[in-house]
Image (cartoon, coloured by chain):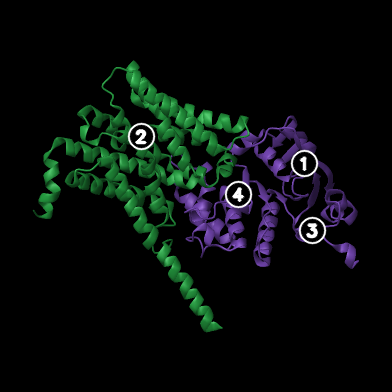
Chain colours: A purple, B green
C-alpha cells in the first residue's frame, strides 16, 4: 500500500540557515501523527515541504505516491492554518470559508452546484457549526474558528489533513470535538499530521508521534516518544513538568 | 431653477456627457478592484503601479501601440523591480516601492517633456475629463469592460488569494499567477482612471471606495456592490459640483469620495467611530450598574 506521506532525507535551507536536516517521515493511511518540537524546530518547514511551498535542497517528497503538485491538484491535501496566519477581520462568513474547500471541485468561475452546497452543510453539521454558519469568521470563539477550518478540509474531501497548532487557544469542548473528528477521519482511511504544543492531548489522539529538532529524533508510539528523557532531547527539559511532581 | 433643470443643464454639452461617462466607468472599475486591494494590503502597491505606468503610456504613444500594452509592461516592470530591490537588499518594501515608482514616474515626465506631441503634461497628471474625445471614450469603455469582466468572473479566486493564499496553493492553484493577474488588471485600471482623474489621484479611487465599503459590511459580496455604488455616486456628484463651481473635475470627484468616506467613518452603524464610542459608554454604564 502506498504511504500517504513519504518524505525521505529532506534538507531545507533558508539562506544559510538550516531549517530541516535530512528529515525522513512516513505517514500511513488511516493514521494520526503528532509532530512535536520547539519553535524553530522545522515543523512549519516540514509542512511547507509536504505542500510543495518549499522545495528541499536534497531528498524526495511523495504524497499519495506522487509528487506534491499532482497530489494538490487531486485535492488530496487539506490544510488548517495557524491562528496568526489568518486575517480574522476578513469580510467572509463561516459558510463561505468552508465553501472554499470545494473550489477544486468547481469550474472556471467557482460556481457552486447542489452537491457543493450539500457537502458544505454536511461538513458544518459534523463540526457543530450549523447555527454559526452565517457569522463572520472572526466572530467565532477560538475553538469554533479551528472547527471551521477543519470543516473546510472535510468539505474538500481531502484524504490528507495537515493541521498547524490546532489546539492553540482552543477550549476543552472544541478540543474534544476536533479530536473525535480527526479520529473519524483516520478511521475512514484519511491521514492526519498535526503539529502541536499540547502534549497531553497526543496519546488520546495520535497513533504516532514524531520528535523534531531540525532532524527527526524519533518516530513511534506517542507514549514512548513523550517519555521525559526523549522530550529532553528536543526541548532541553521536560515541557510536561513531570519532574517536580513525580 | 428646479432640480431637474439643475441636473439636465450640463447634459446639454457633449463634453459633459462624456466626462460623466468616463467618470462613472473609471469609478466603478477602480472601486471593484479596490475591494481586493484594501484587504490584501496593496494600497501602496496601487499607488506605485498607477504612477509607474506613466512611461509605458508615453512610450506606447510614441510608437503608436495601445496605451494598455505600455501600461501593462511598465506595471509589471514596477512590481518586479519592487520585489527585486526588497529581496536583494536590506531595504524594506515601503522604501523599495518609494524608490521604484517615483523613478519610473519621473522617467515618464522626462519622456513627455522631450516628446514633441499633443500630450499635455497637466492632463496626464491631473486628468482631462472635460477634453475626452470620442476615441478616448471608446478606449475607456472597451478596456474597462474587459478588465471588469475578468475581475467579476474570477472574483472567487481573487478573494481566496486575499484571504488564504496557502489554501489556494493547497488546492493546486497557482497563487503567484493569481496575484500577477490582479496586478495586470491594476495596470489596466490605471490607464482607464488616468483619463478621468489623472495619475496622481488614481490611487484615491483605488483605495477609498473599498475602504468605505469595508467599514459598512462583513460580507465581501456586499462590498463588491457597495463600493462601486458609492464611487459612482461620488463621481456624479463631483462632476456636477465642479460644473457649477467651475472647479477641478478630477479633484472634485476624489473630494466627494473622501467626503463619503468621512461620513461612513463617523456614522457607520457597526464600524463607525460614533457607534463605537456609544458602545464603549454603554458597556461602562452597565459595569457601573453591575458594580
In this rendering, which labeled residue sits more in front, label 4 or label 1? 4
Q: Contact, CB < 8 Å: mark 4 with mark 3?
A: no
Give the alpha-carbon distance from disc 4 to disc 3, as whole Å. Answer: 27 Å
Quarter-wise, where is residue A170 in the image? bottom right
Provide the residue designation for mark 2. Answer: B199
> Disc 1: which chain?
A
Crowding at mark 1 (Cα within 10 Å: few <14, some 14-19, many 20+): some
Question: In the depicted view, which residue is nearer to us: A156 or B212?
Answer: B212
Measured as percent of width and height from the top left, residue B158 is found at: 47, 42
Crowding at mark 4 (Cα within 10 Å: few <14, some 14-19, many 20+): few
Q: Contact, CB < 8 Å: mark 4 with mark 1?
A: no
Provide the residue designation for mark 1. Answer: A26
Q: Quadrant of the N terminus of chain A?
A: top right
Quarter-wise, where is residue A206 in the image? bottom right
Residue A111 visible from this viewpoint? no
In this picture, is B113 found above or below B192?
above
In this rendering, which labeled residue sits more in front, label 2 or label 3? 2
Answer yes or no: are tags 3 and 1 on the same subunit: yes
> Disc 4: which chain?
A
Give the alpha-carbon distance from disc 4 to disc 1, as whole Å. Answer: 26 Å
Local SS, label 4: helix
Q: Which mark is residue A203?
A: 3
In this rendering, which labeled residue sits more in front, label 2 or label 4? 2
Give the alpha-carbon distance from disc 2 to disc 1, as whole Å. Answer: 56 Å
In this picture, is A210 found above or below B61?
below
Q: Earlier in the sequence, mark 4 or mark 1?
A: 1
In this picture, is A146 found above or below B137?
below
Give the alpha-carbon distance from disc 2 to disc 4, as whole Å. Answer: 35 Å
Crowding at mark 3 (Cα within 10 Å: few <14, some 14-19, many 20+): some
Crowding at mark 2 (Cα within 10 Å: few <14, some 14-19, many 20+): many
Amino acid at each position: 500500500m502506498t504511504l500517504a506521506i513519504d518524505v525521505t532525507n529532506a534538507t531545507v535551507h533558508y539562506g544559510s540557515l538550516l531549517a530541516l536536516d535530512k528529515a525522513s517521515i512516513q505517514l500511513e493511511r488511516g493514521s494520526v501523527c503528532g509532530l512535536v518540537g520547539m519553535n524553530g524546530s522545522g515543523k512549519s518547514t516540514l509542512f511547507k515541504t509536504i505542500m510543495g511551498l518549499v522545495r528541499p535542497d536534497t531528498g524526495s517528497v511523495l504524497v499519495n505516491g506522487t509528487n506534491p503538485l499532482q497530489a494538490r491538484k487531486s485535492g488530496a491535501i487539506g490544510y488548517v492554518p495557524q491562528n496568526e496566519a489568518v486575517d480574522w477581520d476578513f469580510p467572509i462568513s463561516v459558510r463561505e470559508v468552508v465553501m472554499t474547500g470545494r473550489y477544486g471541485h468547481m469550474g472556471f468561475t467557482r460556481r457552486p452546484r447542489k452537491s457543493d452546497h450539500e457537502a458544505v452543510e454536511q461538513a458544518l453539521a459534523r463540526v457543530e457549526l450549523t447555527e454559526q454558519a452565517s457569522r463572520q469568521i472572526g466572530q467565532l470563539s477560538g475553538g469554533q474558528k479551528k472547527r471551521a477550518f477543519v470543516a473546510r478540509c472535510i468539505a474538500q474531501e481531502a484524504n490528507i489533513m495537515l493541521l498547524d497548532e490546532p489546539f492553540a487557544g482552543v477550549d476543552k469542548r472544541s478540543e474534544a470535538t476536533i479530536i473525535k473528528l480527526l479520529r473519524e477521519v483516520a478511521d475512514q482511511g484519511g491521514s492526519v499530521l498535526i503539529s502541536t504544543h499540547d502534549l497531553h492531548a497526543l496519546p488520546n489522539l495520535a497513533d504516532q508521534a514524531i520528535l523534531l529538532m531540525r532532524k527527526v529524533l524519533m518516530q513511534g508510539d506517542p507514549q514512548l516518544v513523550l517519555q521525559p528523557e526523549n522530550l529532553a532531547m528536543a526541548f532541553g527539559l521536560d515541557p510536561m513538568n513531570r519532574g517536580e511532581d513525580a | 431653477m428646479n432640480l431637474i433643470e439643475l441636473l439636465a443643464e450640463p447634459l446639454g454639452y457633449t463634453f459633459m456627457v462624456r466626462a460623466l461617462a468616463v467618470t462613472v466607468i473609471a469609478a466603478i472599475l477602480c472601486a471593484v478592484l479596490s475591494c481586493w486591494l484594501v484587504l490584501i494590503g496593496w494600497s501602496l502597491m496601487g499607488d506605485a503601479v498607477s504612477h509607474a505606468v506613466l512611461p509605458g503610456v508615453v512610450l506606447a504613444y510614441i510608437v503608436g501601440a495601445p496605451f494598455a500594452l505600455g501600461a501593462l509592461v511598465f506595471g509589471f516592470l514596477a512590481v518586479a523591480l519592487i520585489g527585486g530591490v526588497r529581496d536583494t537588499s536590506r531595504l524594506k518594501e515601503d522604501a523599495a516601492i518609494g524608490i521604484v515608482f517615483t523613478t519610473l514616474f519621473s522617467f515618464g515626465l522626462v519622456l513627455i517633456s522631450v516628446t514633441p506631441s499633443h500630450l499635455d503634461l497637466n492632463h496626464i497628471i491631473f486628468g482631462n475629463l472635460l477634453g475626452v474625445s470620442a476615441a478616448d471614450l471608446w478606449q475607456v469603455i472597451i478596456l474597462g469592460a474587459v478588465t471588469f469582466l475578468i475581475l467579476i468572473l474570477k472574483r472567487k479566486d481573487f478573494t481566496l488569494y486575499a484571504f488564504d493564499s496557502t489554501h489556494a496553493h493547497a488546492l493546486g492553484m497557482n497563487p503567484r499567477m493569481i496575484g500577477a493577474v490582479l496586478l495586470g488588471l491594476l495596470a489596466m485600471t490605471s490607464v482607464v482612471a488616468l483619463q478621468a482623474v489623472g495619475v496622481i489621484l488614481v490611487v484615491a479611487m483605488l483605495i477609498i471606495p473599498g475602504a468605505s465599503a469595508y467599514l459598512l459590511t462583513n460580507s465581501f459580496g456586499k462590498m463588491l456592490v457597495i463600493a462601486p455604488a458609492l464611487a459612482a455616486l461620488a463621481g456624479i456628484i463631483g462632476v456636477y459640483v465642479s460644473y457649477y463651481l467651475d472647479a477641478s473635475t478630477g479633484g472634485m470627484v476624489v473630494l466627494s469620495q473622501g467626503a463619503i468616506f468621512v461620513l461612513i467613518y463617523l456614522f457607520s452603524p457597526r464600524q463607525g467611530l460614533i457607534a463605537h464610542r456609544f458602545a464603549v459608554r454603554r458597556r461602562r454604564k452597565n459595569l457601573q450598574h453591575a458594580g
